[in-house]
Image (spheres, rainbow, N blue to C red):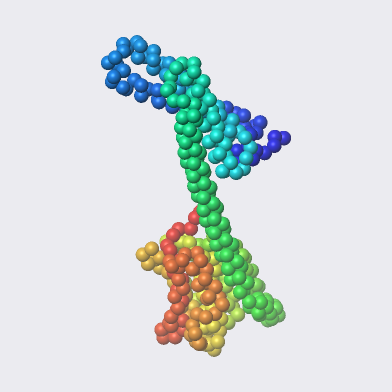
Amino acid sequence: MAEQADVGGAAPLRGEAVAWRPRVATVLLCAVSIALAMSAQFLFQPFVWRNWPWDEVLQAWLELALCRVEVSLAIAAALLGAWALPTRSLGVRAALLSGAIAVAAWAAETLVTEQSGFGDRGPATRLLTWAVMSSSVAAMFYLWRRGVAARDAAQALRLRHVRMQQQLTQLKLQALRSQIEPHFLFNTLATVRSLRGTDPDQGQRLLTHLIDYLRSTGSSASPGGSTLEAEIGVIRAYLGVVEMRMSGRIAVSIDVPDELLRCAIPSLAVATLVENAVKHGLSPKPEGGTVRVSARRNGDSLEVSVADDGVGFVGPGGAGIGLANVRARLRTLHGAKGALRIRANEPAGALLTVVVPWQRASA
């Protein structure tokens, strides 16, 4: 098995040979192209064409181009060699590239000058010139890679933030689900047991409603949210249990247009408001009352309201754990676009409204 290469630019793996060859070919092709482009400036000097025949000009350009190509190929080879050296430090990598460019260019230009006679700079001047140029190239490379690393780090930080928000939402959802109070289940099961002897058929229906409720709360609990249609299913299953336990003391009205059923909404948000209305509004009232669930689109927002005509709030309204949980989840998921509005209902009871951005749930 081939060993893993270092991140900072270690020698390539055996399995990467196919990818390494195109990289070498690309570098060499770029080197030749740059050399030809730099030598072409010789052809755009008017005095050259005025003082020499065209065939001598082209011959001189060809010799100059070959010299430039030799220097460029030497620089390219040095760059490839320096890049293949294993190191994890970006600063060391930049220093290697700078040194490779300076030494290779100085050596190649010195050799070409001695062979062809092109160039009028001394060895020290050439070395200083290439050292400055290579340092500039290495500095640009260093800054570019630092910028890329900073951008990747920022992107990773944003990704971690999103994941933390998802985990927070999941924890809040689990906290919300845990608010299905044990005494609600115990009392319902106790009612089923008592009906087994007095009215088995009604007891069977109550047990069916309870199973539907537990199944619907489990299937709709998703950190990514739910649909209004699924939320209405949870509410119907819950109220099916409550209606039988309260023996006709509660009436239910659900007014949700069909075109809003596929809208996205946080899981169990509306169901919590219905549970709050039953527990704190209607259960304490001897004659019971009515729970009405309605929904409408208001511009770019979806508003789902739960109204009851029970005893209303005693003390500071909306201070319960369940409502605080819903309010926190809306703030986490939608920021300023999510809200829980609470006010008194007329002539009695409470009116609670969940406000979320209007959007279709993803398939």
Corner quadrant of residue 21: top right
Above or below: residue 362 compared with residue 37: below
Identify the residue at image location x=70%, y=34%: 2
Quadrant in the picture for the N terminus: top right
- At 53% across and 87% down in the image, what residue appears? 285
Question: Is 204 situated left or right of 281 in this image?
Answer: right
259 relative to 105 in the view: left or right: left
Residue 216 in view (yes/no)? no
Q: How many numbered dots are placed on residues in this image?
A: 0
**Residue 52 x %, y %:** 31, 13
| Viewer-nearest residue: 150 or 348 | 150
- Residue toward you, 237 or 324: 324
Residue 337 higher or lower than 88, as above or below = below
Q: Is residue 140 visible?
A: yes
The residue depicted at 55 percent of the width and 62 percent of the height is 165
Q: In the rendered image of this protein, does residue 39 appear above or below residue 313? A: above
Residue 318: horizontal and vertical position, in percent?
Answer: 50, 80
Q: Position of residue 150 (x, y in %)?
A: 51, 50
At x 50% / y 72%, what residue is drawn? 327
In the displayed structure image, the side of residue 1 where residue 340 appears, left or right:
left
Quarter-wise, where is residue 305 in the image?
A: bottom left
Q: Residue furthest right?
A: 1
Percent from the top left, x then y, of residue 28? 51, 26
Q: Quadrant of residue 240?
A: bottom right
